[in-house]
Image (tube, grey):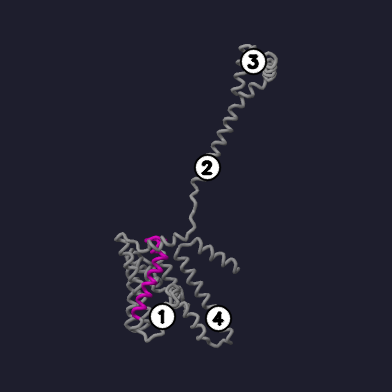
Amino acid sequence: MFNSIVNDIRYQFQSGNTITRLIIVNVALFLAITLFQLILLVSSGFKPQHGLFGEVTNYLFLSDDLLWDAKHPWTIVTHMFTHIGFFHLLFNMMILYWFGRIAGDLLGDHRMLPLYLYSGLAGALIYLLTAPLIYDGGSNLHGASAAIMGIVAAAGITAPDYQMRLLLIGDVRLKYIVAGLLLIYVVGIANMENVGGHMAHLGGAAFGFFYVHMLRQGVDLTRGFRRLISLFKKPVRPPSKPIKRKVTMEVRHRAANQKSDSTTPDEHAFDGDQERLDAILDKIKESGFENLSEADKKFLHDASQK
């Protein structure tokens, strides 16, 4: 059963779109963290071990300490794939799936990964700039919300009148859903609830808006990233030349066969005169070619051409 599940996930990762891959990566990392937490809990006799768990997860979170981040530069990326709470993950993945599907259809699936990463980086930048003004130190940023909000904003500004069917509400235009999410973050900041996280979410959304604006101006901010990724892809050899050579060989082979078949009746026409041909050859041995009759010379000439 487990092998079947793994094979299904592997198939979805290989054949699915970018949004599917992002969801798989986020869920896989969440399960790995949860399993690690469970191992710590069992090994300690079901006594909380927040110290060791926190020390390990700090290597995945983005810290408000710039010196720590400089020593652990990978956290600028890993923090946007890391979730601790189940409902945090569930909510983010649902939003990513709904809006990512729309944005991928409107803007192209090839733009989703760089848009996700750039929006997450924009959110991280806003967090790092505002965290010293909000916290006394020791805070961190984790979760895909800022990266996802970039995709949400991009979808909203691209197709504001696109309708989504919400549970218990019905059809709602995309622009109102995006505005509602932004309002939630603003209210959270006003109430001093997860201020650093909400600031990062607004930063990710701001990049999504800015990206679509620049794209309409003819500037694709993700082009450089996509070119960089293309350098690591294995080049695919075009199949045109081998196919042409194969077809040519087949044509030549068939042509040769056709030629051979077309000559077969003429060759068979002389099979019955083999005795006459042998007799002419004997005459040439005895008296030479010059002494052959005109009929024998013509017969020999025709036979040599076949």
In which quarter of the view is residue 216 placed?
bottom left
Q: Quadrant of the N terminus?
A: bottom right
State which tag comes first along the sequence, 1 or 3: 1
Residue beneath disc 2 = 245
Mark 4 Cα shell of 10 Å, populated few (<14), some (14-19), many (≥20):
few
Count of all numbered marks drawn on residues in the image? 4
Residue beneath disc 1 = 67
Which numbered mark, 3 or 2, is in the foreground of this view?
3
- Residue type for callout 3: Phe
Residue 114: % across, % down? 40, 65
Tell me the SS state at disc 4. helix
Tell me the SS state at disc 1. helix
The answer to whether the residues at label 4 and label 3 have Cβ atoms under 8 Å apart is no
Residue sitting at x 51%, y 83%: 53
Give the residues in magenta.
102-130
Residue 125 in view, yes or no: yes
State which tag comes first along the sequence, 1 or 4: 4
Main secondary structure of the magenta stretch: helix
Residue 184: % across, % down? 34, 77
Which numbered mark, 4 or 2, is in the foreground of this view?
2
Mark 3 Cα shell of 10 Å, populated few (<14), some (14-19), many (≥20):
some
- Residue type for callout 4: Leu
| Spatial CA span between label 1 and label 4 | 31 Å
Mark 1 Cα shell of 10 Å, populated few (<14), some (14-19), many (≥20):
few
Residue beneath disc 4 = 38
Residue beneath disc 3 = 289
